Image (cartoon, grey):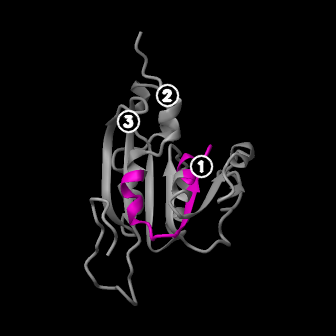
Amino acid sequence: MQTNAPTHAALSQPSPWIARWAHLIRPGGRVLDLACGGGRHARWLAARGYAVLGVDRDAQALAGLPDEVSRLAADLEQGDWPLSGFAPFDAVVVTNYLHRPLWPHLLDALAPQGVLLYETFAAGNETVGKPSNPAFLLRPGELLEAVHGRLRVVAYEDGVVEVPKTAFVQRLCAVREVTEGAGAGLPPRYPLDGAARG
């Protein structure tokens, strides 16, 4: 009998979306992995030389992260935004997590030229499994609406993936552009093929 259950290996690998667009993050930059769980992206990014902060409410999951990953145990859905005293990040990574009230904080947390890499479940997922609650499923175009007027969208997808399991997802890669000072007014250079940033 064939199942569609994800393998442990598939769940420990970075999302192909995150791996595809990570080259846009400033080399050695500061990265926030929000609701990081076991830290598959935190680990992967730290191994590539980024200074990663993993944030999750599960302190036990955070304790399993390697020493090169900083960690903060915080309930992101209760109380004040726990990162208000932190310097801006060169990237914010969010996968398989949705709490809409956090979106303004995530956008404010990005440094100039900072990259938002977001991927989570979308409407339609209720037909193939969990999550099925509309509170945890993006409406069509909702990620685009969340960054409209604040970030430049480099890439966006809305559809079905089969790996690590069949799921309806939305994915976004967006950048906070430089609005003044050095680099302002220049055409954007966001390499689409993984080439080094210029």
Number of the front mark, 3 or 1: 1
**Residue under the image location 36 percent in, 69 percent down:** 149
Q: Is residue 182 above or below residue 157?
A: below
**Residue under the image location 69 percent in, 61 percent down:** 80
Note whether residue 102 is visible. no
**Residue under the image location 39 percent in, 40 percent down:** 169
Question: What mark, if any, has residue 7 been given in the picture?
Answer: 2
The image shows residue 145 at horizontal and vertical percentages of: 37, 57
* Residue on which disc 1 sits: 36
Disc 2 crowd rating (10 Å Cα; few below 14, some 14-19, many 20+) is few
Judged from the image, the secondary structure of the residue bearing numbered disc 2 is: loop
Disc 1 crowd rating (10 Å Cα; few below 14, some 14-19, many 20+) is many
* Residue on which disc 3 sits: 168
Hey, which quadrant is residue 74 in on the image? bottom right
The image shows residue 148 at horizontal and vertical percentages of: 36, 64
Q: Is residue 41 magenta?
A: yes
The image shows residue 14 at horizontal and vertical percentages of: 47, 46
Q: Find the magenta span and give its range.
A: 19-43
